[in-house]
Amino acid sequence: MRTRRIHVGAAWLITAAYILPIYVALVSTFKSQDQILANPAAPPAPFTFDNLANALARPDRLVQGGLVNSILVTTLTVALLVPLASAASLYISQRTPRVKGALLAFFALGLMVPPQVVLLPIVNLLQTVGLDRTYPGLILSNVGGGYLSFAIFVYVGFLRTVPAEIIEAARVDGASDLRIWWQVIMPVIRPATATVSIFLGLWVWNDFLNPLFILGPLQGQTITTGVYLSVGTYSTDYGQLFGIMFLAAIIPVIGYLISQREFIHGLMSGAAK
Amino acid sequence: MPSARRAARRPLGLAAFAWVAIALYLAFLIYPVLQSLLMSFTDRNPLRANSNFVGLENYRELVVDERLRTTLVFTITVVVVVTLVANAFGLGFALLLNRQSLNYRIMRTLVFIPQVLSGVIVAFIWRSILTENGLLNAALQQMGLVTEPITWLGSTQMATISLCAVVSWITIAFATVVYSAALRSVPPSLYEAATVDGAGPLRRFRHVTFPMIAPGTTITVVLCLITTFKLYDVIAVLTGGGPANSTQSTAYYLIQVAFTNNLFGYSSAIAMLLLVLTAGMAYVITHLLRKREGRL
């Protein structure tokens, strides 16, 4: 009993030390500038919402605009990738081993290519088709890039565990391939869809490089590039910066807390492969 | 006949999706890679209308470019340090938190948060901690460990150490969760059997835990490599690549050459080098670790 209590205490001490920077950011959000500079680690006294209010009251509406843009880009990217990748994966899974192997090798490249390698040609390509500095351009390059590879690998891996009899039975009943995909397979592979949506959602939300160079600073920005630009220009007003960051981080953090189980499950299925 | 027609139409539905996926992937991944390759043989510059074929000129530049060499040394330093530190601490953390009560579940939840936040935010938080009058110097001075504040981001050496520390801090979160998941996949009966056979905790770790979590090691090492190679946002916010360009990764330098210096041809040659390095390293490491998994 006593060793157990010591173990819990020690574990908490180490965990607390590890996440101390997050604690500092959290308390700084609710402290005045003076308090932040005088005693960064102290809890807020008095507690203030001024930083959040100031962040939201900015005349350039950086937070509101950024959040709307990020929600839009993230949702549309995931909403396009899930049907596209799941259908393509089902198609790939049903090919002969040789074709399947070739297609998977083709998509594997996307897992390894650093985004910096393809960024310039993508910007040039979008310029050619008139989609540079636009949200459709950013979303399309998200959908066609390495994220697609990730989604396909998760789906193909999961489809291996789906018994072929399910598809056969539906086919005997006269269901078309599209119908089998949407009504039979999609419900079965829901855990894979959860993994894909959660990870891609997080990556797209936190993506910095692509929005910065594809959208450019003049055509609005996502919340992540917005934080970056405010760090550069308002680096003296720490209070407001922490307010902006809190508002930028709250959605992914809450999303993580809610979907934790699927998160861990997704990582585990990755580790098992 | 209708059934035959349906049979003929059947594969088309899904195939259409597959072709759209392949087309987008060709446009936004394969074509850009090939385009980079082609551009690397030219002196393309957006400020000039025409570009010329220059053969291997850009690749010759790769060999003599001192700054590129600095970025490569820096990148490899960060990759090696982060991979070692994240794996060691991640495994240690996972072992520490590998219990099933509410306390430990909460701790495991908290530990992953650095990985959920964007690199921009994490780097800013750390920048505020590492500044001259930031939390770290204040704490060290209060404890009497240092008299003068340390410029954590000011000197080339310190900035490199700080950057490695921050990236490791982020990656430990990832490694901990992967190792935690791997640890939970070890069947308890194995431990029981080992205990019955008279194995102590150390030998149980060496002969049961360690081999069983090998797939966790593979995924952590490979992902550490890939994410560290493409590191950008943390550098941009924490050090801006400075001081004196000492904390620029090759990927960061590539963006500078392309978008600040407008040297598209040369930046494409760097891109090819980065691609070969990343793919080569990922391949070799996966291969080695898979072999190790097989042996264990």
Image: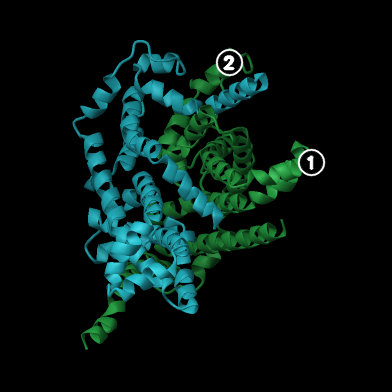
Chain colours: A cyan, B green
Going 26% across and 86% down the picture, which residue do you hit? Answer: B4
Q: CA distance from mark 1 to mark 2?
A: 47 Å
Subunit that carries the residue with mark 1: B
**Residue B51 in sight here:** no
Q: Residue furthest toward the top?
A: A46
Subunit that carries the residue with mark 2: B
Task: Provide the secondary structure element on which disc 2 rests.
Answer: helix
Going 39% across and 39% down the picture, which residue do you hit? Answer: A256
Q: Give me the disc on residue B266.
A: none
Count residues near mark 1 (Cα–Cα under 10 Å), then give few for <14, some for 14-19, many for 20+. some
Going 35% across and 52% down the picture, which residue do you hit? Answer: A210
* Amino acid identity at mark 2: Gln
The percent position of residue A158, horizontal first and vertical second, equals 45, 60
> Which residue is more in the foreground, A205 or B256?
A205
Going 42% across and 67% down the picture, which residue do you hit? Answer: B33
Closer to viewer: mark 1 or mark 2? 1
Q: Judge from the rendering whether residue B275 lies leftward or rightward of residue B198; answer left or right.
A: left
Q: Which residue is mark 2?
A: B141
Q: How many marks?
A: 2
The percent position of residue A97, horizontal first and vertical second, equals 49, 76
Q: Which residue is mark 1?
A: B199
Whether residue A55 is situated above or below residue A97 in the rendered picture: above
> Which residue is more in the foreground, A58 or B2?
B2
* Amino acid identity at mark 1: Ala
- Locate the C terminus of chain B and report the quarter of the image it occupies: bottom right
> Which residue is more in the foreground, A188 or B283?
A188
Q: Residue furthest toward the bottom?
A: B1
